[in-house]
Amino acid sequence: MTLGVHHVAINVDNLEDAVDFYSRYFALREVTKPNDRAGAWLQSLDGTEIHLRQATVPEDNGQHLALLVEDIEETCNLLTDAGITVTSPKPIGSSLQSFLHDPAGNRLEIHQTA
């Protein structure tokens, strides 16, 4: 029986840029890795982790990571003010979603529940 998602690992081409991006705009905090493999582990407030791997980033074919945010308008404004291209929030069911790319080119969804 699955209890939930523990982590997702994504490839990035510049580890420092990726850590800065996810920490600065999404308040993920870097946590200590239990091994000496290259990369970084980031953790959200609920304990879910994103593991960053320095490796070739796959082509964007629609695959994406979705981050739950409290206020999508505020998050979109923060990103836009920083010069990051993000789509306007659109309804999906009773929620809202926007899309952007991280510095490595990974597609990222920001999602706000109703």
Image (tube, helix red, strand yellow):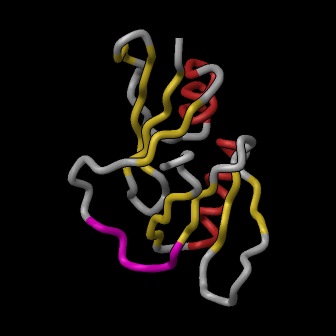
Outermost residue, front direction?
1
Residue 17 within the segment the image draws in magenta: no
Measured from the top left, where is residue 19 in percent x and y? 65, 62
Instruction: Specify start and end residues of the magenta stretch as a single range.
Output: 53-58
User: Residue at horizontal 77%, vertical 65%?
Assistant: 31
Measured from the top left, where is residue 94 in percent x and y? 42, 9
Q: Horizontally, is 6 left or right of 30 in the view?
A: left
Q: For the stretch drawn in magenta, what is the main secondary structure?
A: loop
- Give the vertical position of 113 relative to 40 (above or below): above
Q: Horizontally, is 30 left or right of 1 in the view?
A: right
Q: Horizontally, is 63 left or right of 47 in the view?
A: left
- Give the vertical position of 79 relative to 30 (above or below): above
Outermost residue, bottom direction?
36
- Give the vertical position of 104 relative to 89 (above or below): below
User: Residue at horizontal 43%, vertical 37%?
Assistant: 109
Measured from the top left, where is residue 1 in percent x and y? 48, 49
User: Residue at horizontal 35%, vertical 17%?
Assistant: 92
Res 49 quadrant in image = bottom right
User: Residue at horizontal 66%, vertical 42%?
Assistant: 26
Residue nearer the viewer, 5 or 35: 5
Measured from the top left, where is residue 110 in percent x and y? 49, 33
